[in-house]
């Protein structure tokens, strides 16, 4: 008989940070904050003490270190994805981490956050729920404003600048960017929160979370002389603006190029793109041809995905995949091989495990407003999509030698499919929210 794996205990009460671990957290955070000469500006923070909610943008692991120093010397509890707990569950619980499976609705989490507030500590939330793919704002959950009202404590934002251009999600090498900046702002007192409607709170949160790391870099004239600074960018910029071909972009050193038409760009030391060579066949009249600002290229790809969704034609086709399961924080378990389809109905993953038993996960469009993806996960596993239930997380790896795909396109399509579902069902899409 097959033995079911032990599941991560998501219901355990959050532990307060152990006092003896606080100096360790400060010691691990302060050197990088000093190295990058991080400038933390505080607005309306006079007299603000725990408990409060701290809402942070998310671009790199450096975010956690800056948050630790911004709230010094107070304790906090951090919401962390389950893969962060692998092999160190006890330690992470003791430093105040609360486990969350990404993009799931979990009422247990609400009770845990109430417990943190009752303890008199800070609730640290990264509401974008994933690293930004190109240094700009990701969609925020519409439930965020309601959560803030439920907790009835001050709401503070911490918006960091420079962390993406220093260590982008698609190439984690630390580029030594300095100075980086962070803005810590009291958005709402409990009294202001009680008086504000949820829609107004959400609008203010969306406005607060507007950032663009590449624009910030250009405005401040910050150089990144790293000789391999473009490598990995093709994961994000997967479609050529000269010939329109998908999945044929490649990077080496400081150069991004298209294998189909030969167009190429240099990523400059200031984070801009400078075209080196046009495509061999020129540029079609309905294509932009080039971009200098990386987020503009990314948003052009989004617009193309949106057009496929609106036409009802979006589909990855059937992709051969292998699937790893993460039921607990001990290790990944190879579930088996199968197929994944992402189309107008959402995600469908089916396969057979090593005992010959079938497995299946279906995430329809209304159940998923966004999804989490990884590029070259842990440096050895390749690109993947991770899909979650309340009791398991599946890391789904398309086989690159057997199919053509982009997990970035799947992430964009997930959001655009959800927005279409909302519109089709008479639910207005509010800018920046899902």
Image (tube, rainbow, N blue to C red):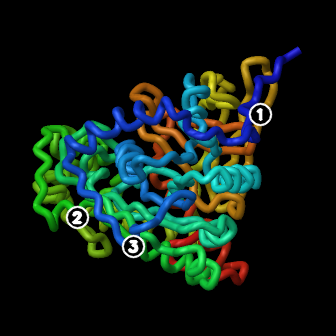
Which residue has dot 2 on it?
Answer: 216
Residue in view at x 65 percent, y 50 percent: 119
The N terminus sits in image quarter: top right
Examine the rendering and report whether any part of residue 104 can be seen: no
Residue in view at x 45 percent, y 52 percent: 408
Instruction: Report crowding for label 3: few under 14, some 14 to 19, many 20 or more residues within 10 A (C-alpha).
Output: few
Residue in view at x 60 percent, y 37 percent: 82
Residue in view at x 33 percent, y 65 percent: 42
User: Is 280 drawn above or below residue 26 in the view shown?
Assistant: below
Which residue has dot 3 on it?
Answer: 44
Mark 2 and mark 1: Cα distance apart in space? 46 Å
Residue 89: x percent and y percent?
60, 28
Along the horizontal axis of the image, is 420 left or right of 425?
A: left
The C terminus sits in image quarter: bottom right
User: Is 31 drawn above or below residue 405 in the view shown?
Assistant: above
Along the horizontal axis of the image, is 152 left or right of 166?
A: right
Q: Are marks 2 and 1 in contact (CB under 8 Å)?
A: no
Q: Which mark is residue 359?
A: 1
- The residue lying furthest to the front in this view is 47
Image quadrant of residue 169? top left
Depth check, mark 2 against mark 3: the one in front is 3
Residue 162: x percent and y percent?
26, 55
């Amino acid at each position: 008989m097959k033995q079911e794996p032990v599941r991560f205990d998501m219901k355990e009460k959050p532990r307060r940070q152990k006092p003896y671990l606080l100096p360790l957290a400060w010691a691990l955070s302060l050197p990088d904050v000093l190295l990058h000469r991080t400038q933390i500006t505080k607005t309306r923070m006079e007299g603000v003490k725990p408990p409060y909610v701290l809402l942070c943008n998310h671009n790199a692991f450096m975010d956690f270190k800056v948050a630790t120093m911004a709230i010094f010397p107070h304790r906090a509890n951090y919401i962390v994805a389950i893969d962060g707990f692998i092999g160190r569950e006890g330690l992470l619980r003791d430093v105040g981490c609360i486990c969350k499976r990404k993009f799931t609705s979990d009422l247990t989490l609400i009770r845990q956050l109430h417990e943190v507030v009752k303890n008199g500590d800070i609730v640290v939330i990264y509401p974008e729920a994933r690293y930004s793919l190109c240094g700009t704002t990701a969609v925020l959950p519409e439930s965020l404003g309601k959560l803030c009202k439920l907790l009835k404590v001050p709401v503070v934002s911490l918006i960091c600048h420079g962390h993406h251009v220093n260590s982008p999600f698609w190439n984690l090498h630390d580029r030594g960017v300095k100075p980086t900046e962070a803005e810590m702002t009291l958005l709402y007192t409990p009294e202001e929160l009680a008086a504000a409607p949820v829609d107004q709170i959400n609008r203010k949160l969306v406005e607060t979370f507007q950032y663009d790391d590449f624009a910030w870099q250009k405005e401040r004239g910050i150089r990144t002389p790293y000789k391999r600074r473009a490598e990995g960018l093709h994961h994000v910029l997967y479609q050529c603006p000269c010939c329109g071909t998908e999945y044929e972009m490649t990077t080496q050193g400081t150069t991004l190029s298209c294998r189909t038409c030969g167009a190429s760009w240099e990523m400059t030391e200031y984070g801009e793109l400078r075209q080196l060579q046009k495509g061999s066949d020129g540029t079609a009249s309905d294509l932009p041809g080039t971009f200098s600002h990386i987020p503009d290229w990314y948003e052009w790809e989004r617009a193309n995905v949106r057009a496929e969704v609106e036409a009802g034609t979006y589909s990855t086709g059937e992709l051969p995949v292998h699937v790893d399961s993460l039921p607990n924080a001990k290790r990944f378990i190879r579930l088996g091989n199968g197929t994944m389809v992402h189309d107008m109905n959402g995600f469908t993953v089916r396969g057979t495990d090593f005992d010959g038993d079938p497995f299946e996960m279906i995430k329809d469009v209304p159940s998923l407003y966004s999804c989490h993806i990884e590029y070259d996960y842990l440096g050895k596993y390749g690109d993947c999509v991770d899909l979650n239930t309340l009791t398991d997380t599946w890391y789904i790896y398309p086989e690159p030698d057997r199919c053509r795909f982009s997990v970035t396109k799947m992430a964009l399509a997930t959001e655009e499919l959800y927005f279409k579902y909302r519109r089709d069902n008479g639910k207005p899409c509010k800018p920046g929210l899902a």
